[in-house]
Amino acid sequence: MTVIKKLVTLLRGSAREIGESVVDSNATRIYEQEIIDAKHSIEKAKGDLTGVMAKEMQSAREIERLKNEVARYEGLALEALNKTQEGLALDVAAKVGALEQELEEQAKAHASYALQVSKLKDLIKSAEARIREHEREIGIAKTTESVYRATQSISENIGSGGSRLANARESLERIRARHEDLSDRMTASKQLEDEFGHGALEKKLAAAGIGGDADRTGKVMERIRARQAKPAAPEA
């Protein structure tokens, strides 16, 4: 029996650990859902508030109506007294008393509605402020979680041996080596062209003063000197 109890306790502990693990891994999502649920509750509270505010306005109108009725019946009672209708005046006075009693009840209801409206408004404002605070907190939490995920990804990629970053660095080194080889080949090709190609022969001819362009500079200088020696034309 003791073994069975221990097994049951072990299963309960395992279930609790699994539940906590699920909650921890989805903490941000649960937090966001709780904020959404709180917003829905606030919207419902606002709906209830509008109902109470409507009753407050209705009671205010009823109070105004009852005041007008009291004033009207008091005038009628006075008119009955002026016509020596004592009994009728008493009946009207009883009507005024009943209206005044109803007026008192409506005034109490109106005050109660006004108090409820004030309290509900304060509660809603406070709840909305707390929700805004929680939304800022969830924003910070999500940003921090993203940073942790990025850090974990970097840590995993910069592991020992064949990590992705090491492979990328090796690829970069191979690209650099290929570029250097291509540059060396282009330099060697230019050197061969200068040494054995058509351009090399033209350079050798020019250096020896052979060819159409061999003494171009000397000819230009002779032409300039000839213009310098020529006398200027007389002015008219």
Image: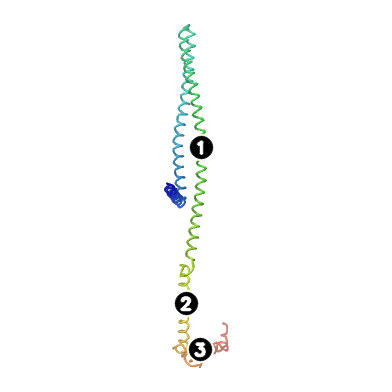
Checking the image for residue 123, the label placed there is 1
**SS at circle 2:** helix
Q: Which residue is mark 3?
A: 216
Amino acid type at image mark 3? Arg
Q: Please provide percent x and percent y for residue 41.
A: 45, 40
Q: Which residue is mark 2?
A: 177
- Which one is earlier in the sequence, the residue at label 3 or at label 2? 2
Name the one closer to the observer, 204 or 114.
114
Q: Is residue 158 above or below residue 62?
A: below
- Which one is earlier in the sequence, the residue at label 3 or at label 1? 1
Q: Residue at x 49, y 55 (%)?
A: 145
The quarter of the image holding the C terminus is: bottom right
**SS at circle 1:** helix
- Which one is earlier in the sequence, the residue at label 2 or at label 1? 1
**SS at circle 3:** helix
What distance separates the C-alpha of mark 3 from that of mark 1? Answer: 100 Å
